[in-house]
Image (cartoon, helix red, strand yellow):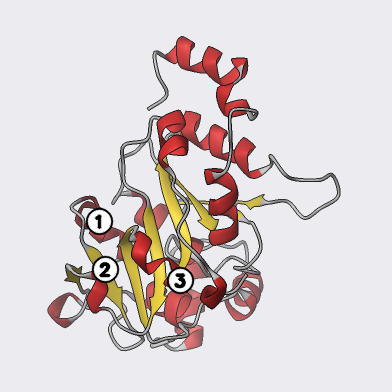
Amino acid sequence: MTQTDRGRQPDPAALLAALELERPLIGLYDAADPAPFAPLVEPGGADGGRCVFEFWETWLQGKTLHLTPERHGCGGAGRALCGVVARDRDDYVDFLWRDEGLRASRELMEGWFDQSPVYRPEHGHLLIGPLKPELFPSLRTVTFWVNPDQLSVLQIGAYYHHAWGDPPPVNAPFSSGCGQLVATFDDLERPQAVIGATDVAMRDQLPRDLLAFTATVPMFERLCALDEASFLYKPFLRDLRAARGGIG
């Protein structure tokens, strides 16, 4: 299903109730016109190097982060979300390998840097913020901000339709935190999910007990369609909820 073929956004209410999830879901949109996403915030101007996740509290307040290839925040977001590399390639590799120690050798770091996927906006504007059902055709991914118990529920949900031998529907790729929001998917039109917010560089922007579970739109639709025949309403989850006194 392509963006233009999409109908109405599925209703996540039943899923959120099962998860006891009160934090808003955050969508990443690729749109031609940012105006319908207002109120907007931007990382440009004097704060042009700000991390995407510095806007965590802004999202919770109902505002949407507006990014473009010209105003994309930090260099990592520019590369991962817009395909813009403003820093010398060798300098960037040395920073990641030598200064931050993210690979055992420079060669390994070069391989990741040169081959890792990036996202290039189709319509010039990336919007990251609360879901807007009326703008569903522009939605690219949906992120749940979850604790370990909630993550386990979404992980099982992602495997609910999985057949043995099919590609795994959930991955936990090495990437910048912003890259895990969209760039790490090999096909946004396939049901897939990524366990994210595992980038140590951005973890200090989030509560310590939260991770991200980011789903493509087809996976989001599957998760929202889980019904009373699924594990959401069976003993395993009821037992966990009882043991914890709730999982939210």
Residue 65: give x, y in percent of width and height: 26, 68
Element under disc 1: helix
Residue 126: give x, y in percent of width and height: 36, 76
Q: Residue at x 17, y 67 (%)?
A: 39
Q: Residue at x 69, y 42 (%)?
A: 159
**Residue pointed to by mark 1:** 59
Total labels drawn: 3
Image position of 154 with respect to 30: above or below:
above
Whichever of labels 2 and 3 marks the residue nearer the N terminus, that label is: 2
**Residue pointed to by mark 3:** 137
Residue found farthest to the front: 7
- Residue 97 horizontal side relative to residue 116, left or right: left
Q: Name the foreground residue: 92 vs 154.
A: 154
Image position of 224 with respect to 178: above or below:
above
Tell me if mark 3 has few (under 14), some (14-19) or many (20+) residues whose alpha carbon lies within 10 angstroms of its own: some
Question: Cα distance, mark 1 to mark 2?
Answer: 8 Å
**Which of the 4 image quarters holds residue 82?**
bottom left
Q: Is residue 174 visible?
A: no
Whichever of labels 1 and 3 marks the residue nearer the N terminus, that label is: 1
**Residue pointed to by mark 2:** 65
Q: Is residue 111 visible?
A: yes
Amino acid type, callout 1:
Trp
Element under disc 2: strand
- Is the residue under label 2 in contact with that under label 1 (CB below 8 Å)? yes
